[in-house]
Amino acid sequence: MQEEITKHSNKIYKTVKNSEHTLGEKVKEIIIEIFIIVFAVTLSIWLHGWSEHRHQQKEVAVFLANLKNDLQNDLKSIDNEVEAYQKTNVDYEKILALTTSQLDSIYNAKSKVDFPIYSHGQTLTVGNYEGFKSSGKLGYIEDEKLKQKILNYYQIYVPAANEVDKMYTEFLFKCFDKEIENADKPEQKLYSDPKYKKTLAYLVKLGKNNIRVYKENTKPLAVELIKEIEKELNK
């Protein structure tokens, strides 16, 4: 394209220098050559922009396909987390329901209270999103509604889920601390202690709250995003 423009520029120069043509013929030829040059430049710019846009949209398609896989994995992780919260909540509530006489019976039978341990860390995948965002390519996504939903999920809902998991784990460690502090005392003393029972009861409340966060907030948006991404990829 650059060679074509140079060729027509040289032609204009020769036309100006050509003494055999009348002024009117020279002006006419110059106008034609200028038009050809302008058209060539415009076409070159358009082709470059089209090629760049096509490349960007290919990158978006790859990103969205990877994001869809991440979200599908997130749904499995969410279901696993909810199931774990539900199971441990049931087990903790059984401990809270034990009466002093029941605890004495367990202790006299030389048995132990089964205290389940399930700490919750970051379970949702953010690698593909963070990589695409840090490269400054989120703006390539032309569907503004889809882009906003992606931002909401990764900027609001994922951090919120991570935060409630963190709070839960911190409170779980408080229960461990109390068990360590009372390691030299009979087990029934610990599990019948009002302060310990209060701590454990609050842990159950946190667990129920976290189930709500996952089931009512994070999971529905992940499901919605998968549908929106599939729609975008099938265009």
Image (cartoon, rainbow, N blue to C red):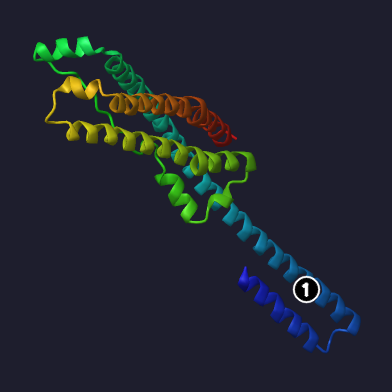
Q: Label 1: which residue? A: 34
Mark 1 surroundings: few (<14), some (14-19) or many (≥20) residues within 10 A: some
Counting from the top left corner in percent of width and height, residue 68 is at: 46, 35
Could you tell me which residue is drawn at 41 percent across and 32 percent down? 74
Quadrant of the snapshot with the N terminus: bottom right
Q: Toward which corner of the image does residue 165 lie, by quadrant?
A: top left
The single residue placed furthest to the right in the displayed view is: 24
User: In the picture provided, is 104 more to the left or to the right than 71?
Assistant: left
Counting from the top left corner in percent of width and height, residue 111 is at: 12, 15
Could you tell me which residue is drawn at 13 percent across and 27 percent down? 185
Numbered-mark total: 1
Q: Is residue 36 above or below residue 153?
A: below
Residue 88 or residue 57, whichever sits in front:
88
Q: Toward which corner of the image does residue 26 lie, by quadrant?
A: bottom right
User: In the picture provided, is 45 more to the left or to the right than 224?
Assistant: right
- SS at badge 1: helix
Q: Is residue 108 above or below residue 43?
A: above
Residue 7 or residue 104, whichever sits in front:
104
Could you tell me which residue is drawn at 86 percent across and 79 percent down? 27
User: The disc labelled 1 sits on which kind of residue?
Assistant: Ile
Residue 52 or residue 131, whichever sits in front:
131
Q: Is residue 86 above or below residue 64?
A: above
Residue 90 or residue 99, whichever sits in front:
99
Counting from the top left corner in percent of width and height, residue 231 is at: 58, 32
Quadrant of the snapshot with the C terminus: top right
Counting from the top left corner in percent of width and height, residue 142 is at: 62, 46
